Image: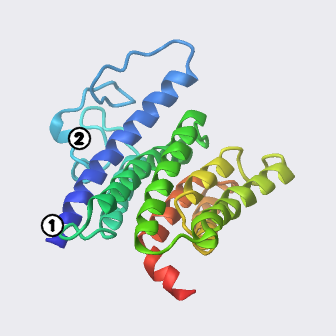
Amino acid sequence: MNVMWWITMFVVGSCMGSFLCCQARRMHLRTSTKKKKNLGARSVCMKCGYQLKWYDNIPVLSWLMLGGRCRKCGKKIGLAELISELGMGCAFAMLASTINIAIAMPLKWGVFLATIVLAVILGGLAIYDGLYGELPVVGLIIAIVCGVIVLVLKEWMLIGEVPFSIDRNIWGPVGAVAVLGGLYFVLYAASRGRWVGDGDWLLGVAVGLTMMSPWLGLVTLCLTNVLACIAIVPVLKKTGKRRIYLGPFMVAAWVIVTTLADVLTSIV
């Protein structure tokens, strides 16, 4: 049952990744040009305008079968679509492992569904940041609101299991937000945006809200920077640019830490 559940969530996530990548490109095209371009309701090739058929829109498989090129004009589609589909598919599958669907109570389902909604919002932000180096303010605000909802549901569930504790229930989440959002804000303010972008600290707040301890926030922070450092090596070799965008790596780190939260918490 668990395997089928994970496979199902991977398929759903990969479909969502395809949708989010498409919408990110549409949104950027609309906001970056003075004239609003009519892209239609269905997906099209951004190079030649060819309207994609349903069999061109199968996540992962269509990209592989077409060799990453448009069926009509043969222009490269790019890796962003494939990475988005695989990334969101893996994210959904990993988050699916945090719930036992056979015995989960309604409140646990509430936490899981709210986390999935947050994953979609964060995924959209990560894709947009990865493509264009920007984090839309509206998306960040929605992510923070959703993060608050996840926090409230987690607190509700935790209070039902163990007695209320100021250190655990109050200072834990506050510390996580301070570690992620606070540190990135200090770096942003100190460097005037040269080290991290103005949206990175807000993304850190959204992510930190769902962590129940400063320890998990610290692990997320460290993992974010480790993933970014690994990614910058091929970027330096290919383009010589020293700047990469933290959004995708912070979201990836959040997914990993959220999935392994119980294991990581048991360490300390």
Name the residue: 35% across, 48% down: 17
Residue 1 lies, in percent from the top left, at 13, 71
Q: Which of 12 and 173 is in front in this view?
A: 173
Residue 72 lies, in percent from the top left, at 25, 32
On the question of residue 242 being in view, the answer is no
* In the rendered image, the vertical position of residue 157 relative to residue 110, given as above or below: below
* Secondary structure at numbered mark 1: helix
Q: Nearer the viewer, residue 169 or 119?
A: 169
Amino acid type for the residue under numbered disc 1? Met
163 horizontally vs 108: left or right = right
Label 2: few (<14), some or many (≥20) within 10 Å?
A: some
| Res. 41 image quadrant | top left
Q: Residue furthest front?
A: 163
| Res. 42 image quadrant | top left
Name the residue: 62% across, 53% down: 205
The residue pinned by badge 2 equals 57
* In the rendered image, the vertical position of residue 238 relative to residue 99, given as above or below: above
Q: Nearest to the eye among marks 1 and 2: give it.
A: 1
Q: Which of 168 and 120 is in front in this view?
A: 168
Residue 268 lies, in percent from the top left, at 58, 86
* Secondary structure at numbered mark 2: loop
Name the residue: 46% across, 74% down: 261
Q: How did the renderer colour the structure? A: rainbow
**Which one is earlier in the sequence, the residue at label 1 or at label 2?**
1
Amino acid type for the residue under numbered disc 2? Asn
The residue pinned by badge 1 equals 4
On the question of residue 49 being in view, the answer is yes
Contact between labelled residues 2 and 1, with CB atoms less than 8 Å apart: no
Label 1: few (<14), some or many (≥20) within 10 Å?
A: few
Residue 36 lies, in percent from the top left, at 48, 14
* In the rendered image, the vertical position of residue 262 relative to residue 151, given as above or below: below
Q: Which of 236 and 124 is in front in this view?
A: 124
